């Protein structure tokens, strides 16, 4: 892989190349520095065009930036040709830029002080050299070779176009501005019939710029991973040049001649391309370059269209209210301000659609989904599938974070203790600084941070809603389960107490009674007088046992062991009101039987206490795979579940078994309590 | 009588054994769970097994199940089951399945004579049913029309009959002559439409079967 040579670590840099590159770079910087000095000398003599001091940093930067970056690349990545292209490019540009002040000094400020003034003027006319090294970079970036052998003719064409242009420029009869009055010292002149050469050379040169752009594009399309990020950095810097040209053309159309500003901009871009190449080679992951490009495109487009709109409106209004009127300008400004928002959206959509299709499609999909969720047409939990589709990664999986338990859950609410890190990459999702989940996705999506992050950002609200819903659902399940556990623990506790009373205290009392009885029966005849006392003691023990039995039975009637029907039938024995019991003889789970029994008990107690009924009907039937319990009385009615704790307790008991409770209690028409328990 | 006792509480077991031995019976084995009971019953073939309902390992109804097994495998051994509380269903099934079975609340033991009488009765092929169980059968809230036709005195007699007592025992209980009791019994059986039989045990079974049928 060529890229490996480019990035390889611990490359031994031979001394000679390092020395040469430093010499070349310093030479370039020295030449441009000398040029700036000469400009000051020319300016002292008020030579027209000289002394534009604010342009100095641009001139210096355009030469020193590629020189510095080149040195850096050559010393760190010696096998990469790019460094040399930059250094040599800088070295070729410096004399061309310095030639103008040199000619000013030699020809105008201090005539005859310096030799070869007209040659310098000729050299300065070779300013298209400006485009030479960026074009070379476009062809060979990032590995120092052409994208493929197929590109060789194009590379020759580009080189040829520059040579042709140079030929056309040096053989011209008149030199370029600002030396149009200087005679061309070059001895060779082309015949007049070759007049077409000059425009053709210019066209060829511009065409070769497009070819260079095509080379970058071709390589970008084939690139992946690191290469892709590197190509993006280069594209970004290269993109600024045509965009700048477009903006300044507009500027010129609207406000007049841009002059030095264009020069400053192009010089700045030269430095920018060099810096971008440096970043691309050394620190390709520095920024989210996709987003930077995207924003630049959007705002350029926005600026251009706003400017156009402003111009058209002011001119059109000027026709009506008179040219130069403040009203026309104001109207243009208002229209521009109004159009800003919609235009920005349109520009973003257009740029996304054209240059970031996956992102555009992904965002559209996610936003449509969010809208559908808002309208209640889809469930937020489907966001996982939507993300997979939006990112074009069918295997993508969304996990919601559950902060309470520090675990993750999938959209079905299954808890995943450890986020699986098997294949693919994990990207944490955040909402307002809190981690709300994890997305497991294909590793290569990491090379598309713009796509990944903007899609996730657009989905973040839906993800948060889904997460909250999953969390609430899980918590409700947990609450249901814990309530069932608590109620069942209550039943267990009742059973345990009942056992303890029966098998502990009651047994002891019986034993004690037997001991007394045996004592009584073994008394000698003369002690029989103790008989009645022992009788009453044993009778007392019998009462204590009966009491204990009643208490234990209230804890949990042992008859429940014989089934719900037996236990309900027993209820009728002690009730002060006639109770009709009709109960299924089927055996159910002990918990359901206990719950149904206690619900019936409490309902009957409530009825007897508050409703003064003359009859109570209890019916327990199996229906739809569950148990239906009905307790109905003919009392005064008007029972309100909100008022007392009795009916609320019933609701809790039924709900703990996953059942439902229905209470109908119209005033004066009795009370019907109907509980449904699921069985199974 | 040769008796085995199955009861897991040692003190109570020894008390019971002492009570029975005081009355002149021979306690041939004392065990603490259902399996051991079955073993000693087949080994000693006793006249009577006094069995606690709840025993190890699960403290559910081991005694009752062992009782049912013994009635099947050793018809010569009568079973008297003692319980801490009423468990009607199994008790009724076993009593109604034939004689030689009794079911009493444990504290009935304290009424020693009654207890010994019940033990004797079941050993002789009769039955003994706890008054509490009988009360559930005769519960006023589930009484049907036929039972309502009985006089209060007849109802008392019916309850004692259902407990498995003989005419003589009933007469003694109610301070009546045996003849009067016999008249009441005849009247009750007539009202319930049951055949009149001279055999006390048969009569009890018929009454129990009737009561079970009319309550379930």
Image: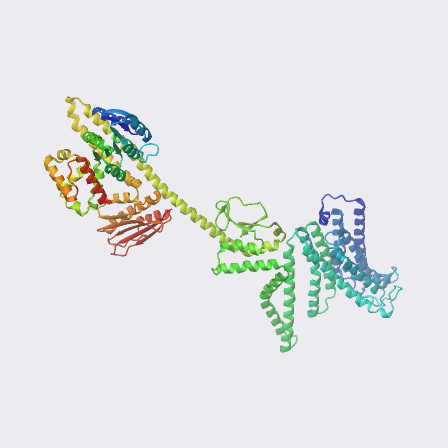
Q: Nearer the viewer, residue A445 or B99?
A: B99
Q: Nearer the viewer, residue A295 or A98?
A: A295
User: Does A187 sit above or below residue A514?
Assistant: below
Q: Nearer the viewer, residue A594 or A108?
A: A594
Instruction: Count the marks.
Output: 0
Q: Nearer the viewer, residue B109 or A637?
A: B109
Task: Give the quadrant of residue A587.
Answer: top left
* Residue at the extreme right of the image, as rendered: A187
Measured from the top left, where is residue A255 in percent x and y?
Answer: 69, 69
Measured from the top left, where is residue A243 in percent x and y?
Answer: 69, 63
How has the structure been colored for display? Answer: rainbow
Residue B77 as seen in the image, left or right of residue A182: left
Task: Give the quadrant of residue A457.
Answer: bottom right
Instruction: Judge whether residue A60 can be spotted in this image.
Output: no
Residue A138 as seen in the image, left or right of residue B206: right
Measured from the top left, where is residue A254 in percent x and y?
Answer: 68, 70
Q: Give me the residue at 25% from left, 56% from top.
A: A669
Measured from the top left, where is residue A93 in percent x and y?
Answer: 79, 57
Instruction: Judge whether residue A479 can be spotted in this image.
Output: yes
Q: Give me the residue at 64% from left, 64% from top.
A: A301
């Amino acid at each position: 892989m060529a890229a490996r040579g480019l990035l390889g670590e611990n490359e031994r840099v031979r001394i000679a190349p390092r020395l040469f590159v430093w010499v070349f770079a310093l030479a370039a910087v020295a030449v441009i520095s000398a040029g700036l000095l000469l400009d000051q000398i020319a300016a002292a003599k008020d030579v027209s065009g000289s002394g534009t001091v604010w342009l100095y940093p641009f001139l210096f930067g355009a030469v020193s930036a590629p020189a510095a970056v080149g040195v850096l690349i050559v010393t760190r990545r010696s096998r990469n040709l790019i460094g040399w292209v930059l250094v040599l490019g800088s070295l070729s540009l410096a004399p061309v830029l310095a030639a103008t002040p040199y000619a000013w000094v030699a020809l105008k400020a201090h005539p005859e002080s310096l030799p070869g003034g007209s040659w310098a003027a000729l050299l300065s006319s070779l300013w298209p050299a400006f485009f030479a090294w960026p074009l070379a970079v476009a062809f060979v970036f990032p590995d120092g070779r052409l994208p493929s052998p197929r590109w060789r003719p194009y590379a020759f064409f580009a080189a040829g176009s520059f040579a042709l242009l140079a030929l056309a420029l040096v053989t011209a009869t008149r030199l370029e501005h600002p030396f149009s009055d200087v005679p061309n010292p070059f001895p060779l002149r082309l015949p007049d019939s070759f007049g077409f050469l000059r425009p053709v050379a210019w066209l060829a040169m511009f065409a070769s710029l497009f070819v260079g752009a095509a080379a970058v594009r071709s390589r970008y399309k084939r690139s992946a991973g690191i290469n892709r990020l590197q190509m993006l950095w280069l594209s970004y810097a290269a993109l600024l040049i045509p965009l700048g040209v477009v903006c300044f053309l507009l500027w010129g159309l609207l406000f007049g001649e841009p002059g030095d500003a264009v020069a400053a901009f192009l010089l700045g871009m030269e430095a920018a391309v060099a810096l971008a190449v440096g970043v691309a080679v050394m620190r390709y992951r520095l920024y989210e370059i996709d987003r930077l490009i995207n924003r630049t495109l959007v705002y350029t487009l926005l600026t251009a269209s706003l400017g156009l709109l402003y111009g058209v409106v002011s001119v059109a209004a000027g026709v009506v209210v008179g040219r130069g009127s403040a009203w026309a300008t104001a109207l243009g400004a208002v229209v521009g301000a109004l159009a800003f928002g919609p235009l920005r959206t349109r520009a973003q959509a257009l740029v996304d659609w054209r240059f970031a299709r996956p992102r555009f499609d992904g965002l559209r999909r996610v936003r449509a989904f969010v809208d559908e969720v808002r309208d209640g047409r889809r469930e937020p939990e489907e966001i996982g599938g939507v993300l997979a589709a939006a990112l074009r990664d069918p295997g993508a999986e969304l996990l919601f974070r559950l902060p309470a338990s520090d675990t993750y859950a999938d959209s079905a609410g299954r808890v995943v203790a450890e986020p699986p890190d098997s294949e693919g990459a994990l990207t944490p999702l955040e909402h307002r600084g809190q981690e709300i989940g994890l997305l497991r996705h294909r590793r290569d999506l990491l090379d598309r941070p713009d796509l990944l992050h903007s899609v996730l950002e657009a989905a973040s609200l839906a993800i948060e809603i889904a997460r909250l819903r999953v969390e609430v659902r899980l918590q409700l399940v947990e609450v249901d389960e814990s309530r069932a556990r608590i109620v069942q623990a209550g039943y267990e506790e009742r059973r345990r107490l009942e056992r303890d009373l029966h098998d502990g205290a009651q047994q002891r009392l019986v034993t004690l009674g037997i001991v007394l009885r045996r004592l009584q029966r073994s008394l000698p005849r003369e002690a029989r007088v103790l008989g009645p006392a022992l009788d009453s003691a044993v009778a007392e023990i019998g009462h204590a046992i009966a009491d204990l039995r009643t208490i234990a039975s209230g804890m949990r009637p042992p008859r429940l062991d014989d089934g719900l029907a037996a236990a309900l039938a027993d209820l009728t024995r002690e009730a002060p009101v006639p109770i009709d019991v009709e109960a299924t003889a089927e055996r159910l789970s002990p918990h359901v039987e206990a719950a149904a029994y206690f619900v019936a008990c409490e309902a009957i107690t409530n009825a007897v206490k508050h409703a003064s009924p003359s009859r109570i009907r209890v019916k327990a039937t199996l229906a739809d795979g569950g148990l239906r319990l009905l307790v109905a009385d003919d009392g005064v009615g008007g029972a309100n579940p909100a008022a007392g704790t009795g009916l609320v307790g019933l609701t809790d008991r039924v709900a703990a078994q996953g059942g439902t409770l229905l209470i109908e209690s119209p005033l004066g028409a009795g009370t019907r309590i109907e509980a449904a328990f699921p069985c199974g | 009588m040769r008796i085995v006792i199955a009861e897991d509480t040692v003190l109570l077991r020894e008390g019971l054994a002492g009570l029975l031995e005081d009355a002149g019976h021979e306690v041939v084995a004392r065990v603490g769970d259902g399996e051991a009971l079955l073993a000693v019953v087949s080994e000693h073939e006793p006249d009577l097994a006094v069995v606690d309902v709840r025993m190890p390992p699960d403290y559910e109804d081991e005694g009752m199940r062992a009782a049912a097994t013994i009635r099947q495998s050793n018809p010569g051994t009568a079973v008297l089951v003692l319980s801490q509380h009423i468990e009607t269903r199994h008790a009724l099934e076993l009593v109604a399945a034939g004689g030689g079975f009794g079911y009493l609340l444990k504290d009935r033991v304290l009424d020693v004579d009654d207890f010994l009488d019940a033990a004797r009765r079941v050993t002789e092929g009769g039955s003994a049913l706890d008054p509490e169980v009988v009360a559930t059968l005769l519960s006023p809230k589930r009484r049907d029309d036929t039972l309502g036709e009985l006089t209060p005195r007849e109802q008392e007699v019916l309850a004692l009959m259902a407990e498995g007592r003989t005419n003589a025992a009933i007469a003694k209980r109610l301070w009546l002559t045996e003849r009067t009791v016999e008249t009441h019994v005849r009247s009750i059986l007539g009202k319930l439409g049951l055949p009149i039989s001279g055999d006390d045990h048969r009569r009890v079974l018929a009454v129990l079967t009737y009561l079970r049928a009319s309550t379930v």
